[in-house]
Image (cartoon, helix red, strand yellow):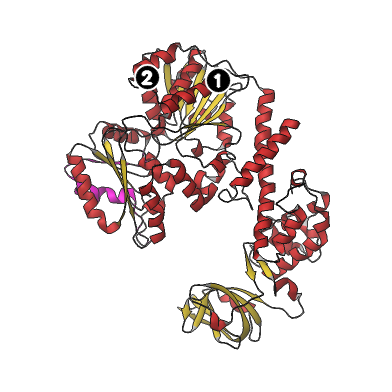
Amino acid sequence: MSQGSAPLETPVGELRGVGSERVAQLARLEIQTVSDLLLHRPRRYEDRRHFKAIAELQLNEAATTRGKIVAAGLKRWGGGSKSVFEFILEDGSARLHCRWWNLPFMEKYFKVGDDVLVYGKLNSAKPRTIDHPETEVVEVGEDVSIHLNRVVPVYPATEGLPQRWLRSLIARTVEEFEAKIPEPPFGKGLKDLPGLAHAIRLLHSPEEIADTEIARRRLAFDELVDLQIAIQTRRKRLEANSRGLPCAGNNQLIRKFLAQLGFQLTTAQTKVLREIRADMGAAQPMRRLLQGDVGSGKTVVAASTALMALESGFDVALMAPTEILAEQHFRNFRKWFSELGISVELLTGSIKTNSASALRPHSATLFVGTHALIENAFAPKKLGLVVIDEQHKFGVAQREKLLRKGVFPHLLVMTATPIPRTLGLTIYGDLDISVIDQLPAGRAKIKTFVRAEEKLPKVWEFIREKISEGRQAFIVYPRVEEADEKSGIKAVTKEFEKLQKTFAPHRVGLLHGKLRSEEKDQVMEAFRANKVQVLLATSVIEVGIDVPNATVMLIENADQFGLAQLHQLRGRIGRGAENSFCILIASAKNVEASERLRVLEETSDGFRIAEEDLKLRGAGELVGQQQSGLPPFQFADFQRDRELVERTRSIVGESLKIK
């Protein structure tokens, strides 16, 4: 309801029965206006036309029941520091014990004789018991039609704000304001979705549970329209206010570069470079996302793109999320470009810009760095191209800050985390998308296995065997120092000493984010040179580490990582001609996690893995809510709403063309 009609912007404090204390409580739920209140989404619904009798309740099955309190009491022990409050509910069919541990104040809310609704799961059958259920006391004289005998919304609430009071307030507000809810322009004429006012009524007063999904879809449509307006307006504004820099180059350097590579580009790489060259010579600045699965050769495409700008006399800035990755890029580009006579400079937190050629007389230079490139000290004379590697690790604001170092430079953002199509149309909706969907020839096959922890001795034996053959291995842990023995989560520093003995006389290295830059460099150099055979690390090695001789990747507590992240980690092996092995260790008790990990056993298709991750973890988890630049949606769901995303993109696109 962003179009906002004046009545809907009425502060909640002006509504009947809402005093200053209630205003403060509602503010904690981010409800300040009538509009906020009408869009306060229920977290679930209870069908209170059909209560279960207490005798019918089943173990571990969520249900709602109703009865009268026949006994209640608080018991304390441990010198008063521990307690349990319990009441017994009776409905004529059986009795139910409801208990709250160490919450003595619950005693204030109930008394014998109260008529109470209880929602929860039975955790014991003898006697029937629910611990910490959700409850509502049925008040005499209340409007029962709001709270009973219908599909009832249960709202997110806050301390001191009773569910029934909030439900009554929202019901009254819908009655009073429904006729004043304006229909937004994009909502008119939708054949398969209700009008906005009707959707809000269905959200709070559904006739059937199915109505709640109809309401959600309509409100998701509005959220996605607002998002597409923001994305597409930003792109239109860029096109209207900027001129593309002439950075298509003359092929002089690229020809030499490709000749010295010693291998042919894949058809996919060549196709993407044609798209990029067209952008680099176009009237508007390039805004392109380059997606390529792990090991598909994005770095060579980035190098060729940089050479187009450098041939045209412009500087290039390449930003990577970690010093390890920035230093690896620096090494690669310096090796490739030194023979072409191009200056390559490294700028990271530990290497200050005043040692770089940013301050020397101008010549077209490639600057490789981390967040240090965003700092004020970095001021290139003639920035023509910005390349951002592993875009999902950066926020939209950081991207914009680097672009402002020049006058509308071209932008290429790269990611090895395949983006499900729905997210691609939203998070990166203002970018054109190129995909490298082909791996270079001669890459090894990676075999992936999910194993229970008791299989570790056999796994150590297998790794020792591979090392003896001259290969190297990565072993990854989820934590640096704080192991959690109760849940079995391991920390890399705690395992280091143990594994040094396991793999003796072979050398074991240690790498994590808390080491100083020079320590990280030394460890990586030793591993690259095969002076260290086993590298223990955290997910700091997730992107860009390229050691072709490493053919084994073991990930402990694999269920602590997302599928897309595991796919990235797996991409550190299989970079040479030897067959490689990825072993994922997960707790056998966690059947769900083991099943989820089987996706990685079955496929190396990053897009399928990303779709699965989206299904399981949601968009905010997959790319980071802050990094995505997405508003925190209340109703839209990327997994379910792919069709709505595509529809709103098309509707808004057509509308902006007309304007």
Q: Residue at x 37, y 58 (%)?
A: 484
Q: Quadrant of residue 254?
A: top left
Query: Marks 1/2: CA distance?
Result: 24 Å
Question: Measured from the top left, where is residue 74 in percent x and y?
Answer: 55, 82
Task: Residue type at mark 2: give it.
Answer: Trp
Of mark 1 and mark 2, the one earlier in the sequence is 1
Crowd class of label 1 (few under 14; some 14 to 19; many from 20; radius 10 Å): few
The one of 493 and 656 positioned closer to us in this rendering: 656
Q: Quadrant of residue 647?
A: top right
Question: Measured from the top left, where is residue 76 in percent x and y?
Answer: 50, 80
Which label was assigned to residue 336? 2
Q: Quadrant of residue 94?
A: bottom right
> How many numbered marks, from 0 up?
2
Disc 1 element: helix
Q: Is residue 351 visible?
A: no
The one of 339 and 56 positioned closer to us in this rendering: 56
The residue where tag 1 is placed is 278
In the image, residue 207 above or below residue 100:
above
Task: Residue type at mark 1: give it.
Answer: Ala
In the image, taking residue 222 as reference, residue 410 lies left or right, namely left
Determine whether label 1 and label 2 are within 8 Å by CB: no
The one of 435 and 401 positioned closer to us in this rendering: 435
| Magenta-colored span | 487-515
Q: Is residue 643 visible?
A: yes
Disc 2 element: helix
In the image, residue 604 above or below residue 482:
above
Q: Residue 477 in magenta?
A: no
Q: Residue 492 in magenta?
A: yes
In the image, taking residue 654 as reference, residue 466 lies left or right, namely left
In the image, residue 304 above or below residue 622:
above
Question: Measured from the top left, where is residue 218 in percent x and y?
Answer: 69, 52
